[in-house]
């Protein structure tokens, strides 16, 4: 075989093997945004976020509306939702990130806000046959220092609407819905 043809054949073979290795390599799969990340991209834009807080049983909920700007960050791996507005007469700012781990198929959500020094972290799986995700985590209770079990249900309604419902369960009590975050695209 002619040396140039031999080198070309080896180069093509290595290229094919490298391409196949990338498809099956777990680190490559873990690193690269996939279909779920593309689904999160549909929420890029400006949204109104209506926060409905259930303060106590028998008391009307408090409803607050703030502005939320959404963008994909870190090369399309995470949806960042940055909120700003007023909450009960005080400036309100929060940053929520939502992602999907290609390795364990879990969604994750983190929230930080100027209304506290804690970080909310929840993770979980999509419910089969639905557009909803059930996330679990814990949050510190500043009143007694105990942990509150948190469940968040994320409902991907359509490209213009998303709903996140927050359910709390303190030690010795039943789970109760405490907050709902309704995102509506501003057109």
Image (spheres, grey):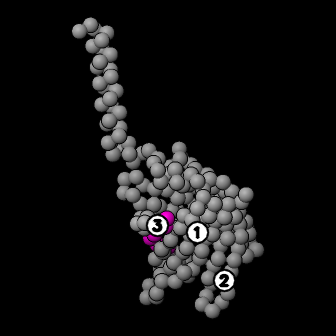
Residue 63 vertical position relative to residue 95 in the rendered view, above or below: below
In the image, residue 50 lies at what x, y percent? 67, 70
Does the rendering let one see residue 111?
no
Q: Which residues are magenta?
A: 130-139
Question: Tag on residue 163?
Answer: 1
Asked which secondary structure carries label 1, the reply is strand
Q: Nearer the viewer, mark 1 or mark 3?
A: 3
Can you say whether 65 is above or below 97 in the image? below
Which mark, by number, is residue 61?
Answer: 2
* CA distance for labels 1 and 3: 14 Å
Asked if 22 appears above or below 154 in the picture, the reply is above
Q: Which mark is residue 130?
A: 3
Residue visible at 63% across and 60% down in the picture: 160
Neighbourhood count class around disc 1 (C-alpha, 10 Å): few under 14, some 14–19, many 20 upward: many
Above or below: residue 131 compared with residue 3: below
Mark nearer the viewer, 2 or 1: 1
Q: Residues within 10 Å of mark 2 (few under 14, many from 20)?
A: some
In the rendered view, does 130 fall on the left or right side of 48? left
Looking at the image, the residue that sits furthest to the bottom is 58
């Amino acid at each position: 075989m002619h040396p140039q043809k031999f080198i070309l054949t080896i180069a093509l073979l290595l290229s094919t093997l490298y391409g196949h290795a990338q498809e099956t390599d777990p680190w490559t799969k873990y690193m690269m945004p996939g279909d779920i990340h593309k689904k999160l991209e549909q929420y890029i834009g400006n949204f109104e976020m209506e926060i409905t807080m259930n303060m106590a049983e028998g008391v009307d909920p408090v409803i607050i509306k703030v502005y939320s700007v959404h963008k994909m960050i870190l090369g399309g791996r995470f949806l960042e939702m940055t909120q700003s507005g007023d909450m009960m007469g005080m400036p309100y700012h929060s940053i929520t990130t939502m992602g999907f781990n290609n390795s364990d198929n879990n969604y994750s959500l983190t929230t930080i806000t100027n209304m506290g020094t804690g970080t909310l972290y929840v993770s979980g799986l999509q419910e089969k046959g639905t557009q909803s995700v059930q996330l679990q985590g814990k949050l510190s209770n500043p009143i007694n220092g105990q942990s509150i079990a948190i469940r968040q249900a994320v409902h991907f309604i359509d490209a213009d609407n998303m709903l996140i419902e927050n359910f709390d369960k303190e030690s010795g009590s039943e789970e109760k819905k405490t907050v709902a975050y309704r995102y509506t695209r501003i057109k």
